Every structure is written in C-alpha cells, then in structure tokens.
Image (cartoon, rainbow, N blue to C red):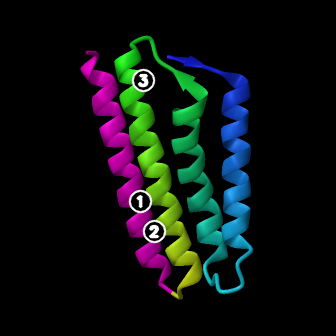
Amino acid sequence: MKVHPVNFLIAIVISALATYGLVSLESNTIRGFIGVGGFTFFASTLAVALGLSFNNARTGANIRVVAFCFFLISLLVNGVFALFNLSQTAYIITSGIFFLIFVLISNSIYGAEQ
C-alpha cells in the first residue's frame, strides 16, 4: 500500500467542503455530530478511494469501489440527518454501523490478497 500525497490532500479537502455544506444547512439541529461524524466518514472513504494505491491491482480496484459506494452511502445518511430533525443517538448508531461495515469489508478484501 502506498500513499499519494496530492490525491490524499484533495480527498481531505473535498471531505471538508462536503462537511461544511452539510453543517451550514439551516435545518441541521445536530451540527456538531454531523461535523465530526461526516468528516470522519467522508475523509476515510475518500482517502482510501483516491489517496491510496495497492500492490495488487484487483485488490485496489475492489477496495476503491467499496470506498466510493460507502462515500455515497455516507453522503446520503448525513444528508438525511442534516435535513430532517432526527435524534443524535440514531445518527451515531447509523453512522457507526455503516462505518464499521466499511472497515470490515475493506479489511476483508485487503486480507484476501488475491
């Protein structure tokens, strides 16, 4: 696994801008949670998808697809929680479960070494 610094930085900045957009919505009542949770989820998925390269091309392609899918899922989840008045507990549980599923699937693909 190798880190591409410029792509990694671009992924972090895109994540920060997406998070800022969600936090600045008027209807968002849990700004702090969406700020921290959204940035963590966005940055981790985009950094893996854009900022890393893998020794095995098949493994890299699979992990990138999973990371982009979970980035879209996190955008949807964070958007729903930012637009609608839902509880903090539901946000933490939902985001945490999706994040841990992302880590589990990515780790399984990386560990398979095919």
Q: Determine whether, in the image, residue 81 is placed left or right of residue 93.
A: right
Q: Earlier in the sequence, mark 1 or mark 3?
A: 3
Q: Which residue is mark 2?
A: 92
Q: Is residue 44 above or below residue 1?
A: below
Specify the amino acid type for callout 2: Ile
Specify the amino acid type for callout 3: Gly
Separation of marks 3 and 2 at Cα, in angstroms: 29 Å
**Image: magenta residue range:** 86-114
Q: Give the prevailing secondary structure in the magenta stretch.
A: helix
At horizontal 35% and vertical 59% (from top left) the residue drawn is 97
Q: Are marks 2 and 1 in contact (CB under 8 Å)?
A: yes
Q: Which mark is residue 55?
A: none
Separation of marks 1 and 3 at Cα, in angstroms: 24 Å
Give the x, y percent position of residue 4. Answer: 65, 21
Q: Nearer the viewer, residue 47 or 103?
A: 47
At horizontal 62% and vertical 55% (from top left) the residue drawn is 39
Q: Which residue is mark 1?
A: 96
> Which of the two discs, 1 and 3, sits closer to the camera?
3
Q: Determine whether, in the image, residue 1 is placed left or right of residue 36.
A: left
Q: Are marks 1 and 3 in contact (CB under 8 Å)?
A: no
Q: Which residue is mark 3?
A: 60
Q: Determine whether, in the image, residue 96 is placed left or right of residue 82.
A: left
Considering every residue shown, the one lying at the far top of the view is 55
Give the x, y percent position of residue 94. Answer: 39, 67
**Circle 1: element type:** helix
Specify the amino acid type for callout 1: Gly
> Which of the two discs, 3 and 2, sits closer to the camera?
3
Q: Residues within 10 Å of mark 3 (few under 14, many from 20)?
A: many
Give the x, y percent position of residue 3. Answer: 61, 21
At horizontal 62% and vertical 60% (from top left) the residue drawn is 36
